Amino acid sequence: MKREWGLTIRDIWDGIRTQPGRIGLALLAIAIGVSSLTILVAVLGGLKEKSRQIVQELGVNVIAILQQKRQNQDLYTGLEERHASVLVSNLPNCSISTIRRYEAPTLGTNDTLTVVATDSSLVKIRQWHLQDGRFLDQRDIENRERNAVVSKSLSKLWNWKVGNIVMLRNSPFKIVGIVDAGGGALDTESGGSGLILGERVIFVPKTITPLWMTSFYKPGYFIDAIFISVPASQNFNITFSKAQQLIYQTQNRAEHIAWVTPESLIRGIKKLQDTIGITIGSIAMLGLVLGGTTLMSLMVANVRDRVTEIGLRRALGATQWDIAILFVIESSIVTGVAAVIGTIGTHLLLVLGKNASPVPIRLGFRSILIPLTVSLVLGIIFSYWPAKMAANITPSEALRYE
């Protein structure tokens, strides 16, 4: 058995090395197609992961109502707490939270922090993870406690811990929790300040008078964003339409309001996925088909050159299956080598240029398995006709050919 396999491998090698030009051309075309396919899988995987991160940072089944423009505060006509109150009264099954964003200095530094005045529901709606301590609770809101929660990035930057006292200008706050408020996936997807909080964020009760500001409105008068968490048991689209009707009944300046949902955030990514799928997918398909047809013509020529050998094998007892499998294995080896070269080379280039890529890249098991599988299937498909043609050669036909 070992001897038979050894002879088979030797015959396959002889068939490959006798046609280096055609083999090289087929390898190149298939490798280009495999490289394009690897890039396609890696980019689509990266975009899919980006979409997941975006939805996760906004929150699943969350509607965000954002204040688009806030010009002169004396002429302010944007979102107010009364709008949130209307939503709370008419959407009883939904969780609703508001935020007001400030920029404030902290004592002893020249740096400013993003101060987010909010309530106790925000962390649950945005589905953020608490690293330590707790988030603001209802007692903090009602009693106007000078408690604060800081972002994980800010905690690491200045080594702030639960129990520390921080100063917002001259106002002291006690840190009661550290929260992971997202990894920045929303930065390129939305310009709304209610979504992009940055890394240096500190959350305080919305009922606290913002003494860190030189001028301000009464707390609770105007807000930057409203977040609505829709229960899974409730129809999201119906709730979204109802929320819009409620807001526009009390707010006639619709141009100052932006509505953000998970679907609206990833709509651009889906369009990019379609565009990349068509362009890079076409290149991959063209390269693979070109490589496959080149390989098939190579195998056909190989069959014609080896008619006498095939006839002799049949005369010595080789079956049609024995002859066919010889050419299928030969084709699979060529496509397999091309796939390995294309996949490894492309992975190295993507690893080196990952940070400079304008689109997210995700390398992993799929970006290796899919190109290899497709190339092997391609080798089997394009070897079918040459293998069948070789299997049908009889000893008598070989003698006539000779």
Image (cartoon, rainbow, N blue to C red):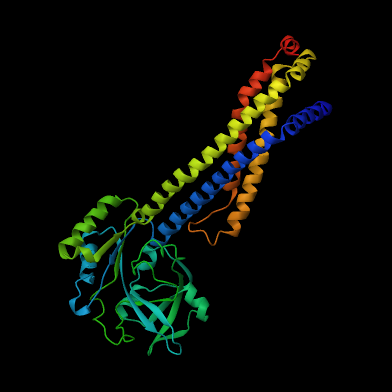
Residue 296 x/y as whole percent:
62, 28
Who's the residue at 80% across and 15% down the image?
316
Does 363 sit left or right of 76 as displayed?
A: right
Q: Residue furthest right?
A: 3
Q: How many callouts does the rendering have? A: 0
* Quadrant into which the N terminus falls: top right
Who's the residue at 51% across and 42% down the image?
283
In the image, residue 220 above or below residue 240 = below
Closest to the observer, 51 or 310: 310
Who's the residue at 22% across and 58% down the image?
244
In the image, residue 316 above or below residue 378 = above
Residue 114 x/y as whole percent:
39, 77
Residue 71 x/y as whole percent:
24, 75
In the image, residue 288 above or below residue 38 = above
Where is residue 111, by image quadrant? bottom left
Q: Does residue 370 appear anywhere in the picture?
A: no
Where is residue 398, by image quadrant? top right
Closest to the observer, 261 or 165: 261
Does 169 sit left or right of 301 as displayed?
A: left
Q: Does residue 315 appear anywhere in the picture?
A: yes
Who's the residue at 22% across and 78% down the image?
72
Does 183 sit left or right of 395 as displayed?
A: left
Where is residue 83, by image quadrant? bottom left
In the image, residue 15 above or below residue 107 = above
Does 260 sit left or right of 385 as displayed?
A: left
